[in-house]
Structures are given as C-alpha cells and as structure tokens.
C-alpha cells in the first residue's frame, strides 16, 4: 500500500520518467507532455484542474501521485508585499525557507537546497543548525513553483502603486538554506527541470548558484553544458581568518579555491561573482580590501559586498556605511568590479544568512 510518505511526487520526475509512468497506466506517452505542461507552464497543482486530460488519467494521478509535498507553515511579507518569505515543512518534519523578491525589472526567488547545513560558517544562522537533510529535486523545484504562483497573484494587487512590476518569475538563486554542492546530484536535477524548454523554461543565465567553496563542485559545474551563473563565498583573502569563519577553508584553502575558480573561468569563459560578507572589525579594513583586490586582480570576476545581517546570539556586527563605501572604493580604484548587495526582508529575517526556520518575534 502507498503511504503519504512514499507516494510518487510528480515534481521528482523528469519528462521521460513521466512518460514511463503514464505508459504503465496503459496511456500513450504524449499524455505525459500534457501533464508536464500543466505542471510547469500552467502551474497546476491539482489533477482535477487538468481538464485537457481524460478523466481516467486524472483519477490515476489523484490516487497514485501527488503534486508537491511541501506544507506551507507560514508566509511573511515585507517591503509592501514585494518580499515574501515562506516557511515550509518537509515530509519528516524538517523545515526550510524560501524568499521571493520582486523588483521593477525582475522577480527572484532564493531557494533552499538542504534543511540546515553541515558547513558551519560562524556568521550564518543556517550553519548553526547543522545538516538535517538533503532536499530532493522535487522539493527544490516546488519552492520555485510556489514563488511563480505568488508572482502571478501578487502583481495585479500591487500594480496600482507599482505599475512596472514583472508578470512572471524571472530568476532563481540557490542561496537559501544549505550548500548546493553538498547535494549536487539532486540540486542539478532541479536545475535541469527548471531549465527544460518543454516545461518551466528558465534560461540558464537566470539561474545562479552560490557555493561556500566546495572545489569538486566548482570543477563539476565547469563541465556542465548549461551555463548557469556561479557565485563563490569568499569573505576574506586571508587563510587564517577564512578557516576561522568557514571551516571548509581547512579542506580547500584559498589558493586551491582560486585555482579551481580560474579553471572554471577558462573552461566556461564566464565571469564569476565573489560574495564578501562585511563584518565590522573582522574583515572590513582598508588593508583587507587591498589584499582582496590583489587576490582577484586580473580575474574575470565581480565582487558582491554583503553587509552582514544580524543573527540573534552572534557576537558580530555589520560594518557601518562609511567602512563599506571605503572598502568598495579601494576595490574599484584597483579596477575590480564591485557592488554592494541591496538587502531585502531583514525585518522578517529573510535576508542572506538569516534563514533558520525559526519564528521572528514581532516588536
Ligand atoms: N551555502 C551557500 C549558499 C547559501 S548562503 C554559500 O555559503 O555560499 C548565501 C550567502 O549568504 C553566502 O554568501 C553566505 O556567506 C551569505 N551569508 C551567510 N550568513 C550571512 C549573514 N548573516 N549576513 C549576510 N550574508 C550571509
Ligand atoms: Fe552553509 Fe552557506 Fe551558511 Fe556556510 S554560509 S553555513 S555554507 S548556508
């Protein structure tokens, strides 16, 4: 007998897999394409709404599959509804968070690839949890579909005050909870599903992954056919400090990381982003900016400065505006492309590094 836990989640199936399933029910394979379109183009989450399918097929879908397994625990919003954070419960009980950010020219969703994270970076809320479990491809994809439905419904409501809002979800960043390269195979299946032109059809350029610096993952991504964007969390140009902030540095120190990054750039001819979280008195001095500039000089790259977002109980503080702009100027004066990330959703703990699946107490 099928239980709720082991019933097939359609978001976990590729189109060829879906074709096999449909055929096992005695239906022609092309029916799978219709289902696939319903799910990824029409964003249907109920077989009964798939009115182009025969009733018997809809019945098979209803009894033998499910469309999604995430349970919405709570949705919080900020920035006049243009930032939304969802807390989802996964089968088994762990929770993950997903953040939608709507801008005039794009709608971006930041998705989680793991519940918790094993990497233990000392400035990150997710890192404090440890790894609870990996997400399946379907669980990763479903977060994106949630956001796509939100955008569809959000835009007409907000369009009076914001006449130029995007009509569709346009970008996916794998920068939520977890380390994508520590769950590479499942994460990559999700990438392929979201890209598939027969379905959700997101361009590779609209997909961005952020890694803590797992070198095997960087080298593997360099070999993939799909040219998605790569961001690497660097946070300092000094090995001692990096090992203190990010235990992964003991395994893949900066020289090894930079060599892999250079290989990636040569193989793909693509610019990488380095993320740099700014922590007051720790990695934000003018000398540290100069060291960073020297480290990346001549590389096809861009630096993304991220003012640290507070995490309760962490004895750290974000750099002030003055220090951030000095840091940025030093990099720019040395010819390094550099921007400061505009933050969204700090008050609902939806900003980078604040995701931990815990409620935020209201003021
Ligand atoms: N595990 C991946 C992707 C998720 S974290 C990685 O580490 O790259 C996404 C980004 O948020 C990373 O650059 C991470 O270093 C940064 N980050 C973590 N905690 C943060 C915080 N409290 N404030 C701002 N950025 C933070
Ligand atoms: Fe994990 Fe990224 Fe947080 Fe580090 S910064 S603990 S890798 S989620």
Image: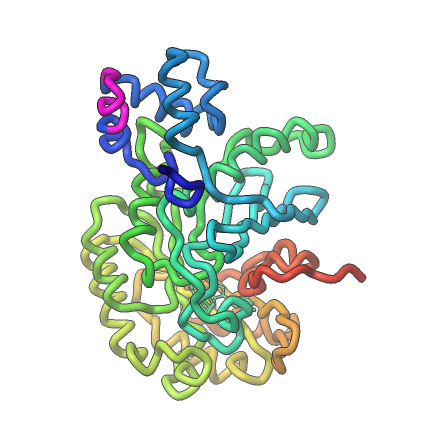
Where are the magenta residues, as a range?
A: 21-28
User: Which residue appears at 41% of the width and 81% of the height?
Assistant: 242
Residue 302 appears in view: no
Q: Is residue 281 above or below residue 63?
A: below
State left or right for residue 150 relative to residue 240: right
Q: Which quadrant of the structure image shows residue 63?
A: top left
Q: Which quadrant of the structure image shows residue 182?
A: bottom left
Q: Nearer the viewer, residue 44 or 28?
A: 28
Q: Residue furthest front?
A: 1
State left or right for residue 54 relative to residue 314: left
- Residue 36 in the image: x percent, y percent? 35, 26
Q: Which quadrant of the structure image shows residue 356?
A: bottom right
- Residue 267 in the image: x percent, y percent? 19, 56
User: Which residue appears at 42% of the width and 78% of the height?
Assistant: 246
> Is 264 a magenta residue?
no
Q: Nearer the viewer, residue 342 or 66?
A: 66
State left or right for residue 13 relative to residue 311: left
User: Which residue appears at 23% of the width and 66% of the height?
Assistant: 216
In the image, ligand 2 is in what quadrant?
bottom left
User: Which residue appears at 49% of the width and 50% of the height?
Assistant: 90
């Amino acid at each position: 007998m099928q239980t709720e836990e082991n019933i097939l989640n359609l978001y976990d199936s590729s189109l060829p897999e879906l074709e096999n399933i449909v055929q096992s029910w005695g239906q022609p394979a092309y029916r799978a394409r219709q289902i696939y379109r319903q799910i990824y183009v029409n964003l249907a989450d109920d077989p009964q709404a798939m009115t182009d399918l025969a009733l018997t097929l809809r019945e098979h879908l209803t009894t033998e599959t499910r469309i999604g397994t995430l349970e919405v625990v709570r949705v919080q919003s900020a920035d006049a509804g243009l930032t939304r954070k969802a807390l989802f419960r996964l089968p088994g009980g762990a929770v993950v968070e997903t953040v939608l950010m709507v801008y005039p020219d794009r709608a971006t969703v930041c998705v989680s690839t793991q519940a918790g994270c094993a990497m233990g970076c000392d400035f990150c809320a997710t890192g404090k949890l440890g790894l609870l479990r990996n997400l399946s491809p379907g669980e990763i994809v479903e977060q994106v579909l949630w956001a796509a439905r939100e955008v569809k419904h959000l835009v007409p409501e907000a369009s009076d005050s914001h006449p130029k809002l995007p009509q569709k979800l346009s970008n996916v960043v794998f920068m939520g909870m977890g380390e994508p390269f520590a769950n590479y195979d499942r994460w990559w299946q999700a990438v392929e599903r979201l890209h598939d032109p027969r379905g959700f059809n997101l361009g590779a350029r609209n997909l961005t992954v952020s890694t803590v610096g797992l070198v095997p993952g960087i080298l593997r991504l360099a070999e993939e056919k799909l040219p998605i964007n790569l961001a690497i969390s660097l946070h300092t140009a000094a090995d001692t400090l990096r090992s203190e902030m990010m235990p992964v540095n003991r395994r893949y120190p900066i020289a090894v990381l930079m060599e892999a990054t250079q290989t990636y750039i040569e193989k793909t001819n693509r610019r990488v982003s380095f993320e740099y979280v700014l922590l007051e008195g720790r990695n934000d001095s003018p000398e540290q900016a100069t060291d960073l500039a020297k480290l990346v000089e001549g590389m096809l790259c861009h630096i993304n400065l991220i003012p640290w977002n507070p995490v309760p109980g962490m004895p750290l503080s974000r750099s002030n505006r003055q220090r951030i702009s000095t840091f940025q100027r030093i990099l720019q004066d040395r010819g390094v492309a550099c921007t400061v990330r505009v933050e969204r959703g700090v008050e609902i703990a939806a900003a980078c590094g604040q995701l931990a699946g815990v409620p935020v107490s209201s003021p």
